[in-house]
Image (cartoon, rainbow, N blue to C red):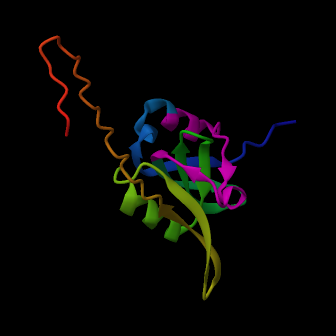
Amino acid sequence: MEEQKRTYKVEILEKKGTCEDELFEIMAKNGDITSQKLADMIGCQVKITGYAICHIITDDKDFSITYFDTDEYGLISSGSIVFLESVISYFGKVDKVILTEIKTKKGKTYKAVPVLTRKKKEETTKNNEEKNDNDFDLPF
């Protein structure tokens, strides 16, 4: 009995940041990517370090999906164009984003909302001068 070979083709359309690595490409083409669904990560703050837009063809499906590499959770996947556009807009410009769900006319989708970080006030150090024997205490 001859075993029927299943179709699995991946074309990486665009890749940025940590997903530009050759290892990611090998993993994608071999079907070895394990990712969490964006829908399960709503409300989380993440640092997106890279992304890759992939077109996948199998025996049953023909679809596009984007993988987002994060420091906190590894790879997160989503087919949301709105989410991808928001990531592209802020990629490299903000340190972290909040993964949010928004309502549209067609239903729900997702968006990356930037976390605005405020710079910490610089701490000023007081000059503690040592008293010298020649210093006088003034009465005022």
Which residue is depicted at the point 73% across and 42% down? Answer: 5
Q: Residue at x 39, y 54 (%)?
A: 118
Q: Position of residue 125 (x, y in %)?
A: 29, 32
Vertical side of 130 occupied by 17: above or below: below
Residue interval drawn in magenta: 24-50
Seen at 23% across and 28% down, the residue is 127
Q: Is residue 126 above or below residue 65?
A: above
Q: Is residue 111 magenta?
A: no
Residue 13, position as x, y percentages in the image = 43, 53
- Report the front residue among 129 and 78: 129
Residue shown at the point (50%, 30%) measured from the top left: 23
Q: Is residue 82 left or right of residue 123?
A: right
What is the residue that sits farthest to the left in this orientation?
134
* Residue 75 place in picture, x, y as percent: 59, 44
Q: What is the total number of numbered labels drawn onto the structure image? A: 0
Furthest residue in direction top, as rendered: 133
Residue 47 lies in the magenta stretch: yes
Q: Residue furthest right?
A: 1
